Amino acid sequence: MSKRYEKEMTAADLAAVKDEDIDTSDIPELDDAFWSKARLVEPDLTQPVTLRVKKSVLDVYKAQGRATRHA
């Protein structure tokens, strides 16, 4: 069995891999036909909003812990 997937790579491990060591044999070539159909898709922008909620609802979100985005 190949040692290729024995452990998960960290960002540092990935940065250390040389270009010539990367197997690209299963990646299709991007020819002119691909680029002629390509189109730019821009992500949706976020919109800031002000929202009024009951204190009890806010308390539920805050109770989920400091590690959440709601705290």
Image: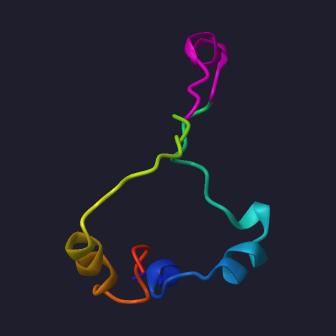
Question: Where is residue 24 shown, x and y percent of the image?
Answer: 61, 51
Q: Nearer the viewer, residue 71 or 12?
A: 71
- Side (left or right) of 63 relative to 14: left
Q: What colour scheme was applied to this rendering of the protein?
A: rainbow
Q: Nearer the viewer, residue 51 or 43?
A: 51
Which residue sits at x=71%, y=67%?
21
Who's the residue at 75% across and 73% down the image? 15
* Magenta stretch: includes residue 35: yes
- Please give the name of the residue rendered at 56% of the width and 37% of the height, measured from the top-left corner: 45
Q: On the image, which quarter does residue 54 sit in?
A: bottom left
Where residue 64 appears, as percent x and y from the top left, is 29, 85
Q: Does the magenta stretch include residue 21?
A: no
Q: In this view, does 8 lie above or below 69?
A: below
Query: Can you give x and y, in whole percent of width and height, for residue 2 in the image?
Result: 46, 80
Residues shaded magenta: 30-43
Residue 42 in percent (x, y) is at: 59, 29
- Position of the N terminus by quadrant: bottom left
In the figure, residue 58 lies in which quadrant?
Answer: bottom left
Q: Which of 59 and 16 is in front in this view?
A: 59
